[in-house]
Image: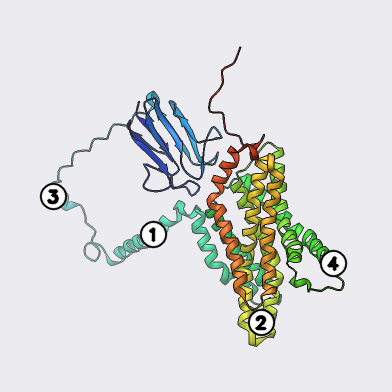
Amino acid sequence: MSELQITSNGKTQTFQPGQIIRIGRSPDNNVVVSDPTVSREHARLVGTDDGWVFEDMGQDRTFVGGRPITRVAVGTQMEVRLATPDGPALLIRTGASVVPQRAPVREQPPQQAQPAAAAAAVPVPVLGRNVPAAEGLGAAINILVPVKSWLSDPGWRQWGRLLVIVYGLLPIIYLQLFANSTKFSTPGWAYSLYIAPLWAIAFWLLIRPGRITGQTVALAAGVIVTVLLLLPSLVTWWEGAVHTIWLISNNPPTVAVSHNLLTWIGGVGYPEETAKALPVLLAALILRSQGKKLDARMWMFIGTIAGLTFGVAESIGYVSNALLDATKNSGDVISDILQFCERVFVDGFQHALWAGISAFFIGIGVNYRRRGIPIVLFGVTLPAVLHGLNDWSLVEFPNNQWVWIGIQTVSLLLFVGYTMSAASIDRQVRKTPMFRGQSMLLDPPSVVQPSST
């Protein structure tokens, strides 16, 4: 067995036969890949009598040639992609393909000390002694406030630093721009749109869907536009129709419509979750018709974007009402302000949780067609029931918000659970014929049968 070389992010490491080489995001690994899409312990290379073997170990998948693998023998040279087909790359070489390391550069012998006369001729700038005070002060300022260095620093192109600047300035810019506005919806739009991108970043870090590409951005933009179109059309029509049907079938009504749980599920949960799920489903089907696919986790992330869009658009009316009530009811102003904050900070987040769950099942159902329709229906029904329970509890238990908090907790735990197990669920579905059938995502055959001719 020969030595092995791994090149990652421009850095090459050499390993001797007999080692177990661990690869992942954790700094304890032999090869550290500091990308959030990579598992902490993603994979390993094990030396056997027949050569090196690459084994996938993490919750996130590994790809060779665009196809997922779990265990593969390493040839003379192989490129591996972690987490997604376009994820962080590892170039693995063995045997003759190993690139010889450069010989270490010999250290130059220390220079001989300069003669005393030459050393004395070189000026030694010492602030306050051998240079003028003004010149010394300027040098100190250039060191302590390196404006020229900052201007040429590539760190300005990193989105994290730019985001901090934008989010630090936006609230006071809003104060200047909207201080004289008479529309109560204005601060709702401003601050809801201010918060939504932060939730989107949090969801991306939780779900770890892979790199955001131009295709992903285009799909998300299409989903956003479609959600905004469906909100005033499909949702308003559906909710009104269910309400009317309930009143007709219960004439005279024996139970107030606001206390009927099925009305909340069928008249609020289903229409709103369908309005968020339908654009994701259409985008996935269009992509599939072109012979393309996305990982279910990427669809889950796009689903959260649909939920944030729906939540921001829906919350504006509630925000306006809360601010209007605060101006009228001075005795209950604290409650009204808290309602405003809840709508701005949490409304989009709540919708994103439910939409993310349904979008995950849409991704599974579209990628694995055999049980696609039941999987998609289950994916929409689960958040629709949670959504209906959530809104019903606020009416049924107006003085006990803990019921509402409990339903929100269940929704949040489900969402976080799916972010943790999305990759393993996807793998199990892919390996189970009951789900997979003739799907778009098939494991490559482990053994190629020879031709009978």
- Amino acid type, callout 1: Pro
Q: CA distance from mark 4 to mark 2?
A: 32 Å
Q: Work out how far the residue at label 4 is from the one at label 1, CA to CA, in angstroms.
A: 69 Å
Q: The N terminus appears in which quarter of the rendering? A: top left
User: Percent from the top left, x then y, of residue 151?
Assistant: 45, 56
CB under 8 Å between callouts 3 and 4? no
Residue at the (79%, 73%) spot, across then down: 255
Nearer to me, 389 or 291: 389
Q: What SS does tag 1 mark?
A: loop
Residue 210: tell me if it is visible.
no
In depth, the one of 369 and 4 nearer the eye is 369
Residue at which label 3 appears: 117
The answer to whether residue 259 is above or below residue 219 is below
> If you read the primary sequence from the N terminus, does the residue marked by circle 2 or circle 1 appear first?
1
Percent coordinates x, y for residue 179 in the rendering: 64, 76
Q: Which residue has dot 2 on it?
A: 326
Residue ID for mark 4 = 244
With 343 as the anchor, is 115 left or right in this view?
A: left
Of circles 1 and 3, the one toward us is 1
Label located before the other in sequence (2 or 3)? 3
Amino acid tagged 4: Thr
Q: Which residue is mark 1?
A: 146
Q: Position of residue 125 (x, y in %)?
A: 24, 58
> Quick check: marks 1 and 3 in contact, CB under 8 Å?
no
In the displayed orientation, state which residue is furthest to the front: 254
Q: Quadrant of residue 266?
A: bottom right
Spatial distance from mark 2 to mark 1, Cα to Cα?
49 Å
